[in-house]
Amino acid sequence: MYEREKQAIIDAALEIKAAGLIHMTGGNISVRMPNGHIIVTPSGMPYETMVPDELIVVDANGNKIEGEYRASVDTVALLHIFKNIPEVNAIIHTHQPYATAVGLITDELPACTTTLCNACGGSVFVAPYSSAASLDMGVKAVENLKGRKAVILKHHGVIAVGANLAEALFSAIYLEDSAKTYLAARAAARNGKVDILTGEEADAAVEVFKDYGQKPK
Ligand SMILES: [Zn+2]
């Protein structure tokens, strides 16, 4: 079941790994199908050798529908996010170092670049600490997404979301890019003060992106 979608998840996992957002068997990716089934990567297995059959399909309550292995330990949190945000159909969880570092010094990565606005919908908030693999991780993620396409989990990593896998991937990768820029600017600034986009400029950057890329004719 869902061979093509499962392969797309494996491809995305390899892409975030190549981008340095995860190492070893870290993180997880999950995608909700139109019928409500959710595909989740297995717990603690290497992505390089992963085949579609190793992914797990569960229903909205976490009951296993297909798959031999144990789903990601964060599944309870992921299901909470899917349940509470209907427009989210893909979640990428990473331990990306730069965005995580931002979460250690502030409660919000401000709208400092147009790419952050494009990919994440504006500034990105930091959720208070929650234990990995807990429902609390999902609850705090939902509370702090606030309409954005990513949230930083304090002392842990990032949850990037999207209406589809491509959107979540875009969000995770460009969030890391902007976090690097932000930290470099803060480190270089004499007083640590960084210029950020005005609310109006940030909104315009979100708007303009809606026209980005190729549209079907
Ligand atoms: Zn994690």
Image (spheres, rainbow, N blue to C red):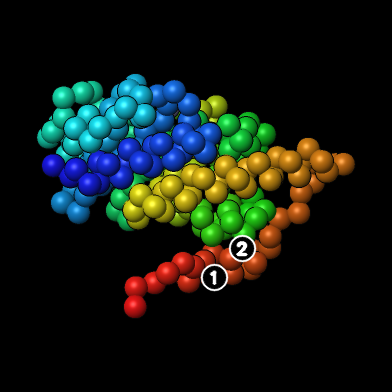
The amino acid beneath tag 2 is Ala
Horizontal placement of 73 versus 208: left or right?
left
Q: Which mark is residue 8?
A: none
SS category of the residue bearing label 1: helix
Who's the residue at 45% across and 54% down the image?
147
Q: Which mark is residue 208?
A: 1
Q: Position of residue 211 (x, y in %)?
A: 48, 71
Residue 130 against residue 88 in the figure, above or below: above
Q: Position of residue 39 (x, y in %)?
A: 24, 39
Who's the residue at 44% across and 44% down the image?
160
| The N terminus lies in quadrant | top left
Asked whether the beta carbons under mark 2 and mark 1 sit within 8 Å of each other, the answer is no
Q: Is mark 2 within 8 Å of ligand 1?
A: no
Who's the residue at 66% across and 41% down the image?
180
Cα distance between the residues tagged 2 and 1: 10 Å
Q: Residue furthest bottom?
A: 217
Residue 182 against residue 196 in the figure, above or below: above
Who's the residue at 53% across and 34% down the image?
20
Q: Position of residue 170 (x, y in %)?
A: 47, 51
**Residue that badge 2 annotates:** 202
If you read the primary sequence from the N terminus, does the residue marked by circle 2 or circle 1 appear first? 2
Local packing at callout 1 (Cα closer than 10 Å; few below 14, some 14-19, many 20+) is few
Q: Is mark 1 within 8 Å of ligand 1?
A: no
Horizontal placement of 4 versus 180: left or right?
left
The amino acid beneath tag 1 is Val
Kindly indicate the quadrant of the structure image that contains residue 122. Answer: bottom right
Q: Position of residue 116 (x, y in %)?
A: 58, 53
SS category of the residue bearing label 2: helix
| The C terminus lies in quadrant | bottom left
